[in-house]
Image: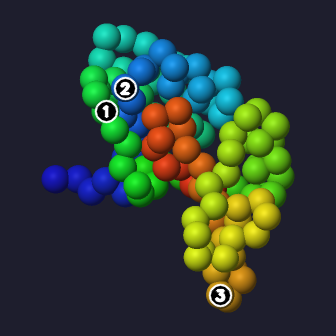
């Protein structure tokens, strides 16, 4: 078997309403749709593939399912907020006013937000 280190990445986000998720991921997050078939809406994410799959009755879990490494977390948050996204503040995490948690050594910054189904998404800056 050949290793997967050079294989393309495909990730999945589950939704109860594929049309609403497709609109949000394309209009709000700016991802490009590359396909749409009876099984999934397929979006491009800088070389990776995101498949949005409808599962009737789907309920999101409490943990992150997808995240992005960004160069400017504050700028990215400002852009998302301008499009109606609310950053999630977790009690006791010590996040700043933007919702950014900074690691004790100051080298990592992380923020979280939700898609329309409540899937937890994250931004990270290292």
Q: In the rendered structure, are the residues bearing label 3 and label 2 in contact, judged by CB atoms less than 8 Å apart? A: no
Vertical side of 61 occupied by 93: above or below: below
111 relative to 80 in the view: left or right:
left
Q: CA distance from mark 2 to mark 1?
A: 5 Å
Disc number for residue 104: 3
Residue 67 placement (x, y as % from top left): 54, 52
Residue 109 in view (yes/no): no
Q: CA distance from mark 3 to mark 2?
A: 37 Å
Which residue lies most toward the front here?
91
In this view, the residue in front, 84 or 30, is 84
Q: Closer to the camera: disc 3 or disc 1?
A: 1
Secondary structure at badge 1 equals loop
The local crowd at label 2, few if under 14, some if 14 to 19, many if 20 or more residues have their Cα within 10 Å, is some
Residue 74 placement (x, y as % from top left): 81, 58
Residue 71 placement (x, y as % from top left): 75, 58
> Residue shown at 58%/29% (left/top)?
25
Judging by the rendered image, the residue that carries numbered circle 2 is 16
> Residue shown at 43%/13% (left/top)?
36
Please report whichever mark, 3 or 2, sits nearer to the chain's N-terminal start.
2
Please report whichever mark, 3 or 1, sits nearer to the chain's N-terminal start.
1
Q: Closer to the camera: disc 3 or disc 2?
A: 2
Please report whichever mark, 2 or 1, sits nearer to the chain's N-terminal start.
2
Q: In the rendered structure, are the residues bearing label 2 and label 1 in contact, judged by CB atoms less than 8 Å apart? A: yes
The local crowd at label 3, few if under 14, some if 14 to 19, many if 20 or more residues have their Cα within 10 Å, is few
> Residue shown at 67%/23% (left/top)?
27
Disc number for residue 98: none
Disc number for residue 58: 1
Which picture quadrant has residue 92?
A: bottom right
In this view, the residue in front, 76 or 84, is 84
């Amino acid at each position: 078997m050949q290793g997967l280190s050079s294989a393309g990445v495909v990730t999945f986000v589950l939704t109860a309403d594929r049309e609403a998720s497709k609109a949000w991921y394309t209009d709000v997050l700016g991802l490009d749709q590359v396909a749409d078939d009876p099984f999934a809406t397929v979006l491009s994410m800088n070389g990776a593939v995101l498949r949005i799959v409808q599962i009737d009755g789907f309920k999101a879990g409490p943990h992150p399912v997808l995240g992005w490494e960004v160069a400017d977390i504050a700028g990215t948050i400002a852009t998302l907020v301008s499009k109606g996204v609310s950053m999630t503040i977790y009690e006791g995490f010590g996040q700043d006013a933007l919702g950014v948690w900074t690691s004790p050594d100051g080298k990592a910054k992380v923020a979280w937000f939700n898609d329309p189904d409540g899937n937890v998404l994250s931004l990270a800056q290292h």
